[in-house]
Image (cartoon, rainbow, N blue to C red):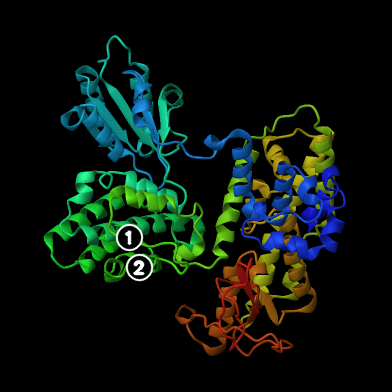
């Protein structure tokens, strides 16, 4: 609402705030829509606003859907070529290279270009002994040097993988590339390098080399297309040579769907995987070959064997978290089972849109994949519809952060408005900040006591927040002085200035702060609430209900609760663990509990009713979490 109010001050949006207040139902349709960019705006606003202005308004109403809006805007104004990833063109990149020009693969999670490179080398007649591959790391520098010296003379290819892991050898590689001359280097020689983005990678090599990247496809549909166009599935002889063709094609499609699912779940953050694993095409390729081999060797379907190899070894070998291992095995059971082969009505999701096509030619599978929706709903991944909000909001933040990186920080014409805004915002924040806590007075009022560890927790929390308060206040005061020219605008103050302009928390503050992902305005309000909580504690005594998420260092409070219990009952503290109970809304909190502590400020993700003796229910639409009492 604050953003809509500010937007109403701009000329094209004059009267917007009043119209939204008077036509709540009409605007609620856009808020609730799964495709707000395709939903008509109420009354005059649909025709009165340009496409860009509509996108600005959607930014206020549904920021999680801004990425598809930007894609449509770019597609409509610049053409589809700017939003659709181009096909990986290895022959074209090779044609642009020379014997003194290295070819560089910029790696990304989930993509492995080595298999495509080896196949291309075979096609060019440089397979086998004519191509040497080495994964760089500790002690591999001298070996790489010998390979390069030999290849430069003999005219063979050298592939040096994972350059980012051999930081100390990068200056040597830079010198080797700089010394390459057309007259002294064999015309057939090619140097291929792979590396994740790294500040240690030599800039001259990047500037002079042919750079390529092969990111994993985005979206379930594109992932399936990539899998079916990759080797060995695209090989017609391999695709048709299995002794159990119907079972192979069904299970193969299930395996590709599984591969796409486990990769796409990364987009959902911790809701998808506790740890973002780098599943790639190599995992799929090995699993496909094993499926083909086992079906040729056994007359019955070896579901258990291929499930174990795929789920526990090929993909599961990357999984380190116990819960993630259970999830990946459970997901695989949806696609590797007897029903997918024997039941033509077997579906992968409740919507019925996703299933393994009937036995057919290779092209028929590609046609079916191309008929699937571009954007897959969360139900395909066995997730609630609200999971999309988390994923889309993450994409929006990444988009805006990337755009802000392109903005220069240097001075120039028109900086007066920024200076005025900086002074206004910094003065407003300083005015809100209370005085620093008097920790010595707090220690006198709440001295260290054997049976009440909360006294120590309070004094320690006040000390931590004082450091943060001093940092925030000093940086803003110095920023005001720098704007007036009274002190030098240092790099540190420049970063604070840029963060305030962009509504973000300055890095200087975060170095002395509790973790927070809030924008600047919400962060300041949250900080004031935390300081008020401690101030009330100091004035009124130990609270009956503690705001758990309001502590700077929550572990200190948790330890204090344990310590009180351990000293009361003379029990070793390291033998204690917590038990949790969600309390009803009408709980009487006029006095503290006999043991333990009442806390609020906890949130449950992925669940609805969390009151005591209330059955769980699905989350409400647009609600990503539920607050516990």
Residue 100 pos. (x, y %):
34, 18
- Callouts 1 and 2 close, C-beta under 8 Å: yes
Which element carries disc 1, helix, strand or loop? helix
Disc 1 versus disc 2: distance between alpha carbons? 8 Å
Query: Can the viewer see residue 617?
Result: yes
Mark 2: give few (<14), some (14-19) or many (20+) Cα within 10 Å.
some
| Residue at x 56% of width, y 60% of height | 388
Query: Can the viewer see residue 448?
Result: no
| Residue at x 29% of width, y 49% of height | 362
Which element carries disc 2, helix, strand or loop? helix
Q: Nearer the viewer, residue 378 or 214?
A: 378
| Residue at x 19% of width, y 27% of height | 130
Q: Any mark on residue 254, and which?
A: 1
Give above or below for 70 relative to 150.
below
The residue to which callout 2 is attached is: 334
Residue 427 pos. (x, y %):
84, 48
């Amino acid at each position: 609402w604050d953003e809509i109010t500010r937007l109403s001050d701009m000329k094209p949006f004059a009267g917007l705030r009043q119209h939204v207040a008077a036509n709540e139902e009409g605007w609620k349709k856009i808020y609730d829509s799964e495709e707000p960019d395709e939903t008509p705006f109420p009354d005059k606003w649909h025709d009165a606003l340009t496409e860009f202005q509509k996108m600005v308004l959607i930014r206020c109403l549904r920021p999680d859907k801004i990425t598809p809006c930007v894609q449509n805007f770019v597609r409509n104004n610049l053409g589809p070529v700017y939003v659709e990833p181009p096909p990986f063109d290895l022959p074209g990149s090779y044609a642009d290279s020379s014997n003194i020009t290295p070819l560089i693969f910029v790696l990304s999670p989930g993509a492995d270009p080595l298999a495509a490179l080896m196949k291309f080398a075979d096609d060019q007649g440089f397979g086998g002994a004519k191509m040497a591959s080495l994964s760089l790391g500790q002690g591999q520098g001298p070996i790489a040097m010998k390979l390069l010296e030999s290849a430069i003379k003999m005219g063979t290819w050298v592939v040096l993988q994972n350059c980012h892991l051999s930081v100390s050898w990068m200056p040597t590689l830079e010198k080797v590339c700089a010394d390459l001359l057309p007259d002294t280097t064999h015309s057939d020689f090619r140097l291929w390098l792979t590396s994740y983005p790294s500040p240690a990678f030599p800039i001259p090599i990047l500037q002079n080399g042919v750079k390529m990247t092969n990111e994993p496809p985005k979206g379930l549909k594109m992932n399936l297309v990539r899998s079916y166009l990759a080797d060995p599935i695209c090989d017609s002889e391999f695709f048709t040579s299995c002794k159990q063709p119907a079972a192979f094609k069904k299970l193969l499609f299930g395996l590709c769907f599984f591969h796409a699912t486990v990769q796409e779940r990364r987009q959902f953050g911790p809701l998808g995987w506790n740890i973002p694993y780098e599943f790639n095409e190599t995992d799929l390729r090995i699993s496909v070959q094993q499926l083909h081999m086992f079906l040729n060797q056994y007359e019955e379907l070896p579901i258990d064997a291929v499930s174990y190899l795929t789920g526990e070894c090929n993909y599961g070998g990357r999984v380190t978290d116990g819960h993630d291992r259970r999830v990946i095995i459970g997901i695989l059971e949806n696609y590797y089972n007897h029903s997918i082969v024997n039941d033509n009505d077997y579906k992968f999701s409740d919507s019925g849109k996703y299933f393994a096509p009937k036995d057919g030619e290779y092209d028929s599978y590609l046609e079916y994949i191309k008929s699937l929706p571009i954007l897959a709903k969360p139900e395909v991944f066995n997730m609630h519809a609200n999971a999309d909000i988390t994923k889309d909001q993450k994409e929006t933040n990444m988009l805006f952060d990337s755009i802000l990186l392109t903005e220069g920080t240097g001075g120039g014409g028109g900086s007066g408005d920024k200076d005025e805004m900086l002074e206004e915002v910094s003065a407003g924040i300083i005015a809100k900040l209370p005085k620093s806590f008097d920790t010595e007075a707090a220690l006198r009022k709440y001295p260290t006591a054997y049976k009440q560890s909360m006294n120590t927790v309070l004094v320690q929390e006040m000390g931590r927040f004082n450091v943060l308060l001093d940092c925030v206040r000093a940086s803003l005061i110095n920023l005001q002085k720098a704007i007036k020219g009274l002190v030098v605008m240092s790099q540190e103050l420049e970063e604070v200035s840029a963060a305030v302009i962009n509504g973000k928390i300055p890095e200087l503050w975060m170095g002395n702060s509790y973790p927070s992902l809030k924008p600047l305005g919400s962060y300041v309000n949250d900080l004031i609430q935390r300081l008020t909580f401690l101030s009330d504690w100091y004035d009124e005594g130990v609270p009956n209900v503690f705001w758990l998420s309001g502590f700077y260092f929550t572990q200190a409070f948790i330890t204090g609760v344990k310590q009180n219990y351990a000293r009361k009952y003379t029990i070793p503290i390291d033998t204690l663990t917590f038990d949790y109970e969600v309390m009803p809304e009408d709980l009487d909190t006029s006095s503290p509990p006999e043991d333990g502590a009442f806390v609020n400020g906890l949130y449950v993700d992925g669940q609805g009713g969390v009151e005591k003796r209330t059955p769980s229910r699905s989350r409400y639409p647009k609600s990503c979490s539920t607050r516990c009492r």
